[in-house]
Amino acid sequence: MVIHFDETTKIFHLQGGQVSYLFQIVEGFLVHIYWGKQLRHQAFSLEDIEAWAYNQQQVQNPNRLGLIQVRERSSFHPQPIPGKKSYSLDTLAQEFPQYGTSDYRQPAYQVQLDDGTRITELRYESHRIVPGKPALAGLPAVYTESDNEAETLILTLADDYSGLKAHLSYTVFAHSNAIARSVCYENTGAKTLLLEKAGSAAIDFADSDFELISLWGAHERERHLQRQKLVRGSVRLESRRGSSSHQMNPFAALVRPTTDEQQGDVYGFSFVYSGNFCIETEVEQFNMTRVTVGINNFDFSWVLESAASFQTPEVILVYSAEGLGGMSRTYHELYRTRLCRGRFRDEVRPILVNNWEATYFDFNAEKIAAISQAGSELGIELFVLDDGWFGHRDDDTSSLGDWFVNKNKLPNGLKDLADGVNQMGMQFGLWFEPEMVSVDSELYRRHPDWCLHVPDRRRTESRSQLVLDLSRQEVIDYLDETLSAVLSSAPIAYVKWDMNRNFSEAGSARLEPRHQKEVAHRYMLGLYQLLERIVTKFPAILFESCSGGGGRFDPGMLFYMPQTWTSDNSDAVERLKIQYGTSLVYPVSTMGAHVSAVPNHQVKRITSLDMRADVAMSGNFGYELDLTKFTAEERALVQRQTANYKGIRKLVQQGDLYRLLSPFDGNYTSWMVVAKDKREAVVFYFRTLSEPNPALRRVKLQGLDPNLDYRFEGNDSAYGGDWLMDFGWAVPLLQGDFTSSWFKLTAQ
Ligand code: DGJ
């Protein structure tokens, strides 16, 4: 990994992993040159730079490479650089596009000056290259453990007129095909500026022969894969809900039309943020494609006082020449090992049982003890007490904010309950929804102004609750103190941190009018501050984030909590799509997946206990049903399932994922996980509906070592990795609907 800068041509060449990224300073503007497969570093002469797009002839400098495309001048492409009539900001590929000086495409940022004007012209001022990767104050970010792992370019652009500076940060990694980009905006002028858009990154591609992949959805239907042709005009993938959302994940990828799982160019954008975001693509007149990524500029502005700075969240760019599978494995490795933190980053995760779908609000200490006892006999390691243990909460209409035990249900308190669970050989976990307040709660009666609201306006309730105003320091301090007291009061080994509504009336009673558009981002900063405090104070607790399932399944939350409840939909068939889509970006170790009862509570489907377990074993395995109701036969099966999972969980949670068959393409789904040293693999295969008189199906495995021979567990024969990958594995006969099978391969 190395960052080159050529003083003559003013070209930066960033090389990291197997990727190159190049741009040039032209009269202070940054012109994008290349992002893709790694290129050898080469010194160019100034004659090599221009490639002409001309009315009469294509190339003016024959036999030259032509690094940046320039055009014959035209009335409709203004030329800001004296003496360079062929250079227009409107037609050059930009690295950090600005508004108002003749680039008519979407800018990376927008700012309003004190005099009401909106024009700034950021030009190169200086740069420095530092080892490692500096942390982003107050924000989640990918990190390094030693300076040898990465190198960071910090490039400063300045607008002399306003005093605005943008410090662009680019990190390249020694062993990853990722590049981390973010921006710190600084006001060095005497007058206040208003940031109206604060992008984290922008990039221009030379053509538009792309398809756009996004992960859209809804509650109980998260992260479904959408692939659409990129056409002229703009597409905005965004959230305006206050959280990253069920509806659109903060991720996009541009792929070539022929790209598939195993081959083809992929350019991934994953935004490390849990609030309102926008990823916008724009295809313009010459078929160039611009992508901008950042905090959503919709309903956003930030007052940047003199001498103040604004640090954006970072976006992780991943290039893969090995299709979507290659992109996913790059994200997985980086996020699992250099975004997730703490003790549990590298530890296998416990098999849990959660009482939510078993009891909902209707439980007491005896019921909890019975489920825990059954769990411990079945090989389950952690009992999680979900919603309803606090205040007087017997349904979802009250008590959020009142984090003291509900003595009607648990007369001897939490410690007694947790000790009892521990004595059965299980760890104890607890659910919270700290960011919320019920209207019927002591907290709300005491502090009715502590929620997001607009004074004298109606407050829109959702699930009878309001969102606490985490832009207020006293609210953060109160939550820190209250949660810490509960967490210290009993042997709590796990916390599920839930969040069950989106924002409305997103105002803060504490802020002056000119700061009101800052509320959504200030909330995120407050949440991150609170999370940092809590996870630092309780390093022995495993935290799982949740937002009505996967409504905030994003890299920002993973910085604090290494796993997420993937979806409130626990139906095995629906989960195939949800987990497949989620795996595009997020590692298996981050995906909570549980076996639940049938008929399934969300879709009423009846699937086999085998299939439910096989789907859940493809993630962070657990159960979410009343374990005391199993028949003897089911109990024996569940005992085998937990034992099996313990045998493969390190591999499943920490290996490399290969997607073999997509549930979005039809009746079959398959994926496999291969150990880093390629000596072990586990393959999962699912068929949704039975078929009459089917053809033989063969699945070609991936990721094995072609030169090793692998043995199926329980079979003496061994087969070459090349055979398993190129000839394929004949799928065993499966009987009936909703069936599955899995097996383990071990190298000889
Ligand atoms: C939503 C979560 O996703 C569920 O798992 C459960 O914890 C409920 N909230 C409890 O209210």
Image: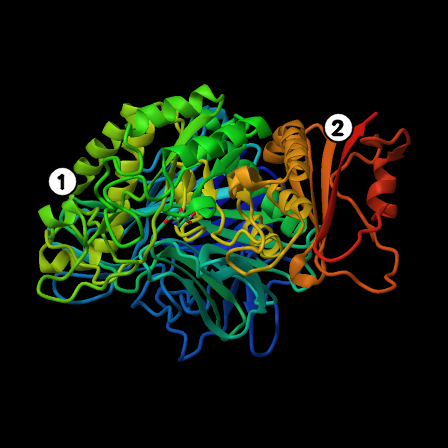
Say what amino acid the circle numbered 1 marks.
Answer: Glu
Q: Mark 1 points at which residue?
A: 474
Residues marked 2 and 1 touching at CB (< 8 Å):
no
| Residue 462, picture quadrant | bottom left
In front of the other: 98 or 344: 344
In which quadrant is the N terminus drawn?
top right
Q: What element carries label 1?
A: helix
Image-based side of 73 in relation to 62, left or right: left
Q: What is the count of numbered marks?
A: 2
Question: Is the residue marked by circle 1 packed among few (<14), some (14-19), or many (20+) residues within 10 Å?
Answer: few
Vertical relation: 681 (above or below) 201: above
Disc 1: residue Cβ within 8 A of ligand 1's nearest atom: no
Percent coordinates x, y for residue 387 in the rendering: 35, 44
Question: Is the residue marked by circle 2 packed among few (<14), some (14-19), or many (20+) residues within 10 Å?
Answer: some
Which residue does the image show at 25% across and 35% down from the upper left? Answer: 407
Percent coordinates x, y for residue 200 in the rendering: 37, 51
Which residue does the image show at 13% across and 40% down from the upper left? Answer: 474
Which residue does the image show at 17% across and 61% down from the upper left? Answer: 113
Percent coordinates x, y for residue 573 in the rendering: 62, 56
- Tag shown at residue 164: none
Q: What element carries label 2?
A: loop
Q: Name the residue under label 2.
A: 679
**Looking at the image, can residue 365 be seen?**
yes
In front of the other: 714 or 210: 714
Q: Residue furthest right?
A: 717
In which quadrant is the C terminus drawn?
top right
Percent coordinates x, y for residue 276 in the rendering: 34, 57
**Looking at the image, can residue 15 be seen?**
no
| Residue 526, picture quadrant | top left
Q: Which colour scheme is used?
A: rainbow
Q: If you read the primary sequence from the N terminus, does the residue marked by circle 2 or circle 1 appear first?
A: 1
- Which is closer to the viewer, label 2 or label 1? 1
